Image: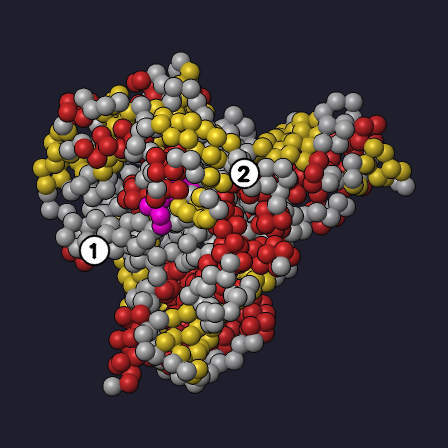
């Protein structure tokens, strides 16, 4: 199938087997291997990318469903120098092996926008007020991104610091 | 020039304490950080090669004799290039051995065993074809239940000192309880992956592996070629936790297929295959007996374990490894029994032995403290041995008392009877446990080059599986050579470089670190010789040599780069003294009286691991251990179907590792320590210590909160609720 994917601001015309997931299109066809495959089943979050600004698991959707869509991968974040979020991940040791890290960072970027738009989460007490940037809100909203090295304390601190600075 | 050291006794000169750069131990950011946060670190499956094709492994759907495959039909499918049904290993190789993994001898000995590899032009074609391939099997009845299985008693793992039965009969207080831990899985985030490419008779394997010098030999033997014809590359590895110690089917399959097709072949395990085709931590049954006098001094310790593995595998989960030396008692008995089952192969998973052995032993210690009406911290303090209780050897260092005392103070430990605190429908309680883990040194080599411009390069086939090797080897070299860390480059993960210990058993940092230290010591000696002074009198800092009030830039001393090698080997030190690491865990939990759910509210660990090489990466490893403890205590369990043994919940949706929201604020304190017996850098392992007993602090906290004693892990709500109902009825 012929589709056009707009990835990190650049258009790519692809002729793909309809079975190719968005994740495999990125990794195997565009050689953007920053997006990781941890489970291929939407269970680990390592493949999180931004689809038209919203975070999704790239393994759970087929590439051919995204003709004309705008996709941001880790390669499109901090391409001209590390963002404060990426810098904070390094500073707070928000990773060890690094395999889940691109997904964590893309997920955090998407989550920040959800927070900004006032989306409540399971731990938000007042569903009508703007959610606050608490430890619990971050931990809850980042629980779709697994880290077996278990760098959750560093991940929470990195996100809290970088979003706190923006606020 | 090569500097060699065999460690036969204490290394008392503590040279690293006398260096001037001041970077060792500091919380240096990982040098590999910028690559990892931008997605530019390339893991095994991410190498881009021309004409590369994809292989997908096929699993055995039942146990029995392999009876042919419908290969012809699959070969005719679109894009299919090859169907391999010969030559794949039955299971992964064990760690730190040079032998190939066992072949399948025409049998599927467990459900999920790799039995074929289908290779096609694209991943989608290979996946479809692999799913289509029918595996012919003449079924046989699998042995699943360890209690109905043939068992063995490995001679070296039995202990019998004094008379435990007599001590149990005469003691003022006794405990005799049986505990169970389920099958557990490493579940690293990066699935096992290999890309194989041949250049004539030479193989290059881009693999996700932990111990490259062994992996190279394992692979060479599996392929029937000389190890010198194999190069393994693993610059970045997405976690291992033991599951990547030895080569697995994807490496052998990729190499065989690539040789047959004359094209590079990539084989990446699917997540569900990672659970089945790599190694698991054995389920354990542990009978623990304790006998104590009225003052809470232990008179007897018994620890019997039943573990499992496939027939023929030499590894058996060393459950009682920590029981040999954790507490004093004149009467001691250990029975170690291995059941031969048709289940996924068992191998090392983070802290093999102590992770489950110390955890259940520390639950038993908590139960015993209650029977004695003693504060559990005090009970442990009363039983710390002053020498190895098994054979009288001195301890290289034993920091258990300091870890317990410091931890209790920092946590604000207060011993309270169960069910003393309630908030709404939640019971609140605190628990603690001790941590012990054996410490080892293994052979390791490294090469270091220093240039006149004041730049250094460290090269070794050591791996960084997230453990921080890039950071700590950089820091050791910078400290020894007096360079800012930015002037030091560390190159890892290539078998063309000097062979290192590899990552495993918590010995990687100290072993490979010692080899880098020795190479740097040799460079220092050569610089000192050129200055006509003793090496001990040489100060190196910021690219300058300082001696007798003179500061000389390296460029004035060196006219060409110096390259040296360091080589460390274990000697008698580990035989003369008991080498181990110690710590303590404290946890506060809330247990829901209505649902039986447990939430960990805070956790603290104190650990002594000798010299800390990087406090930031060491602390992160301790966080990892504590969180694995939460998982082990509350959620992790790989369930085997009792009929055919298949792993029912073999994915990350159903095998519940902790997620971000399961983890509270964690506090880690590393006790200052130098262990001279350990190695020339006085440093010990930290990556595993923090899981050894961590789960027990959670289990003990559940008891303190609501009075329910969980002896079968994990403490899922159904078990806690049953206990609550029993108490209240």
Task: Quarter of the image for the N terminus of chain B: give it.
Answer: top right
Relative to A119, say whether B156 is above or below: above
Residue A158 seen in the current view:
yes
- Chain on which label 1 sits: B
Disc on res. A76: 2
Per the picture, the main secondary structure of the magenta-coloured stretch is loop
Query: In front: mark 2 or mark 1?
Result: 2
Check residue A42 for magenta coloring: yes
Q: Is residue B634 left or right of residue B476?
A: left
Q: Nearer the viewer, residue A137 or B596?
A: A137
Circle 1 crowding by C-alpha within 10 Å: few under 14, some 14–19, many from 20:
many
Is label 2 in contact with label 1 (beta carbons under 8 Å)?
Answer: no
Residue displayed at 75% across by 45% down: B21
Check residue B590 for magenta coloring: no
Disc on res. B226: none
- Chain on which label 2 sits: A
Name the element at disc 2. helix
- Where residue B457 sits in the image (x, y, percent)? 65, 31
- Where residue B639 sits in the image (x, y, percent)? 25, 55
Disc on res. B146: 1
- Where residue B640 sits in the image (x, y, percent)? 22, 53
Q: Is residue B602 left or right of residue A17?
A: right
Residue displayed at 34% across by 31% down: B267
What residue occupies the far front of the structure in this picture?
A68
Relative to A35, say whether B586 is above or below: below
Residue displayed at 70% across by 38% down: B486
Name the element at disc 1. helix
Q: Nearer the viewer, residue A118 or B14?
A: A118
Region of the chain picked out in magenta, as a range: A36-43
Q: Is residue B452 left or right of residue B262?
A: right
Task: Quarter of the image for the C terminus of chain B: give it.
Answer: bottom left
């Amino acid at each position: 199938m012929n589709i056009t994917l707009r990835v990190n601001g650049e258009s790519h015309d692809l002729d793909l087997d309809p079975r190719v997931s968005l994740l495999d299109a990125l990794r195997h066809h565009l050689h953007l291997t920053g997006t990781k495959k941890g489970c291929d089943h939407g269970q680990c979050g390592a493949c999180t990318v931004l689809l038209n600004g919203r975070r999704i698991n790239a393994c759970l959707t087929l590439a051919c469903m995204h003709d004309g869509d705008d996709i941001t991968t880790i390669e499109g974040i901090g391409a001209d120098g590390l963002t404060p979020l990426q810098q904070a991940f390094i500073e707070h040791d928000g990773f060890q092996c690094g395999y889940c890290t691109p997904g964590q960072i893309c997920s955090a970027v998407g989550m920040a926008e959800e927070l900004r738009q006032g989306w409540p989460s399971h731990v938000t007490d007042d569903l009508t007020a703007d959610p606050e940037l608490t430890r619990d809100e971050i931990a809850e909203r980042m629980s779709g991104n697994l880290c077996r090295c278990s760098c959750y304390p560093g991940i929470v601190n990195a996100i809290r610091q970088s979003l706190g600075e923006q606020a | 020039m090569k500097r060699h050291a065999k460690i036969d006794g204490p290394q008392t000169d503590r040279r690293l304490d006398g260096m001037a750069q001041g970077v060792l131990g500091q919380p240096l950011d990982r040098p590999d950080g910028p690559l990892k946060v931008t997605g530019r670190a390339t893991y095994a499956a991410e190498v881009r090669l021309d004409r590369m094709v994809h292989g997908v492994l096929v699993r055995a759907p039942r146990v029995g004799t392999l009876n042919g495959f419908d290969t012809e039909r699959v070969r005719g499918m679109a894009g299919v290039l090859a169907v391999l049904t010969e030559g794949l290993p039955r299971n992964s190789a064990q760690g730190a051995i040079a032998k190939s993994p066992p072949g399948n001898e025409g049998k599927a000995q467990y459900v999920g065993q790799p039995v074929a590899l289908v290779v096609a032009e694209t991943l989608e074609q290979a996946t479809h074809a692999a799913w289509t391939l029918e595996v012919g099997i003449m079924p046989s009845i699998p042995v699943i239940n360890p209690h109905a299985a043939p068992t063995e008693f490995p001679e070296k793992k039995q202990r019998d000192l004094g008379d435990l039965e007599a001590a149990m009969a005469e003691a003022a207080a006794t405990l005799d309880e049986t505990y169970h831990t389920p099958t557990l899985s490493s579940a690293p985030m990066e699935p096992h992956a290999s890309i194989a490419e041949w250049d004539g008779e030479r193989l290059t394997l881009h693999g996700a592996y932990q111990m490259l010098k062994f992996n190279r030999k394992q692979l060479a033997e599996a392929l029937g070629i000389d190890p010198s014809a194999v190069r393994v590359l693993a610059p970045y590895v997405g976690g291992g936790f033991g599951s990547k110690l030895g080569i697995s089917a994807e490496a052998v399959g990729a190499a065989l297929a690539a040789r047959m097709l004359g094209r590079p072949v990539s084989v990446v395990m699917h997540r569900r295959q990672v659970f089945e085709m790599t190694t698991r931590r054995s389920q354990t049954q542990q009978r623990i007996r304790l006998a104590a006098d009225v003052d809470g001094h232990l008179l007897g310790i018994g620890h019997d374990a039943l573990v499992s593995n496939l027939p023929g595998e030499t590894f058996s989960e060393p459950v009682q490894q920590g029981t040999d030396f954790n507490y004093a008692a004149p009467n001691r008995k250990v029975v170690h029994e291995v059941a031969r089952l048709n289940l996924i192969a068992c191998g090392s998973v983070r802290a093999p032995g102590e992770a489950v052995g110390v955890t259940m032993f520390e639950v038993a210690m908590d139960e015993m403290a209650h029977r004695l009406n003693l504060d559990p911290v005090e009970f442990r303090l009363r039983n710390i041995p002053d020498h190895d209780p098994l054979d009288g050897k001195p301890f290289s260092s034993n920091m258990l008392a300091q870890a317990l005392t410091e931890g209790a103070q920092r946590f604000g430990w207060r011993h309270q009877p169960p069910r003393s605190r309630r908030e709404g429908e939640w019971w609140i309680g605190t628990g603690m446990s001790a941590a012990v883990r054996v410490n080892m040194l293994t052979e390791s080599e490294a090469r270091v080059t220093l240039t006149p411009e004041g730049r250094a390069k460290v090269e070794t086939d050591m791996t960084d599986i997230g453990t921080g090797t890039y950071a700590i080897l950089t820091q050791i070299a910078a400290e020894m050579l007096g360079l800012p860390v930015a002037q030091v480059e560390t190159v890892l993960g290539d078998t063309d470089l000097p062979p290192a210990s590899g990552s495993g058993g918590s010995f990687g940092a100290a072993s490979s670190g010692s080899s880098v230290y020795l190479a740097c010591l040799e460079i220092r000696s050569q610089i000192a010789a050129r200055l006509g002074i003793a090496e001990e009198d040489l100060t190196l800092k910021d690219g300058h040599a300082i001696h007798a009030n003179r500061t000389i830039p390296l460029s004035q001393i060196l006219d060409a780069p110096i390259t040296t090698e360091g080589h460390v080997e274990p000697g008698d030190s580990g035989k003369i003294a008991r080498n181990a690491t110690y710590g303590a865990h404290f946890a506060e939990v809330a247990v829901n009286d209505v649902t039986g759910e447990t939430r960990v509210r805070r956790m603290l660990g104190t650990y002594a691991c000798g010299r800390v090489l990087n406090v930031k990466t060491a602390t992160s490893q301790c966080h990892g251990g504590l969180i694995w403890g939460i998982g082990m205590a509350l959620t992790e369990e790989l369930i085997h179907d009792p009929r055919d043994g298949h792993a029912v919940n073999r994915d990350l949706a159903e095998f519940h590792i902790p997620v971000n929201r399961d983890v509270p604020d964690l506090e880690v304190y590393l006790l200052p320590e130098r262990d001279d017996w350990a190695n020339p850098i006085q440093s010990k392992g930290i990556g595993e210590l923090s899981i050894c007993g961590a789960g027990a602090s959670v289990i003990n906290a559940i008891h303190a909160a609501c009075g329910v004693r969980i002896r079968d892990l994990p403490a899922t709500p159904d078990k806690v609720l049953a206990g609550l109902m029993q108490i209240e009825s």
